[in-house]
Image (cartoon, rainbow, N blue to C red):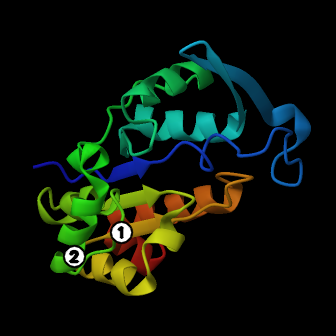
Amino acid sequence: MSSTPVCLLDIDGVINSLLLKPPTHAWPQDMWKTGIYESNMNEFPLLWAQPVVDYLTGLHAQGRVEFRWHTTWQETAPEFGKIVGLPEFPVADCPEAKANQGLLAKQQILKGEPVWWKYPAARRVLTDERRPLIWIDDDLFGNVTKVYRNGLGQLGKILLLCPDGQTGLLPKHMRQIEEVLLLWEDPRGAVSGS
């Protein structure tokens, strides 16, 4: 069984800014890239910070994290990845994304879980796979209350990041990821300070 952390990765508000113009308070103007996603003769503008893509690509190349798309883009997420220059990540196994949302909500309430289709996949990483979890989603804290976030923390090692949807991931988020990965990779070194 792998001990490599799984990162459930959203797109909009995490990599793709929800703004049409670069938020230069987040990253300098020259670090922002633009593109177009075309679907069914519709075009959707994309805006991302290249340092974010570079950082995620580096983590993947080093094998420190196993990325899985966990987004409403679902099966089209790898197309987004190609446009922005990310490696090919699989889409997280999440049958709840296609489930009857009303029925799913009732089932989740009965289980004592948040009513959000993304939650069960995160829980399964911790319970079924028994692997550390990094979950990055700009809607995370709005959809998963502190009680449930703490509950996930009791199931295993987690890092939950909820970036501002306008800026997406920032250097402070990358520092948090690095800190937790160093701790998970060598808990003794992190404790001793070596």
Instruction: From this view, report whether residue 124 is shown above or below residue 83.
Output: below
Callout 1–callout 2 Cβ contact below 8 Å: yes
Residue at 48 percent across and 21 percent down: it is: 79
Look at label 2 and name its amino acid.
Answer: Leu
Q: Which residue is mark 2?
A: 155
Look at label 1 and name its amino acid.
Answer: Ile
Return the x and y of residue 41 as percentages of the image width and height: 60, 12
Instruction: From this view, report whether residue 68 is shown above or below residue 178.
Output: above
Quarter of the image where one finds residue 119: bottom left
Return the x and y of residue 91 as percentages of the image width and height: 33, 35
Secondary structure under tag 1 reads strand
The disc at residue 150 is none
Return the x and y of residue 9 as percentages of the image width and height: 45, 47
Query: Is 154 left or right of 15, judged from the image as shown?
Result: left
Instruction: From this view, report whether residue 72 is shown above or below residue 165.
Output: above
Query: Is 101 left or right of 141, judged from the image as shown?
Result: left
Q: Which residue is mark 1?
A: 158
Residue at 61 percent across and 42 percent down: it is: 15
Residue at 17 percent across and 78 percent down: it is: 110
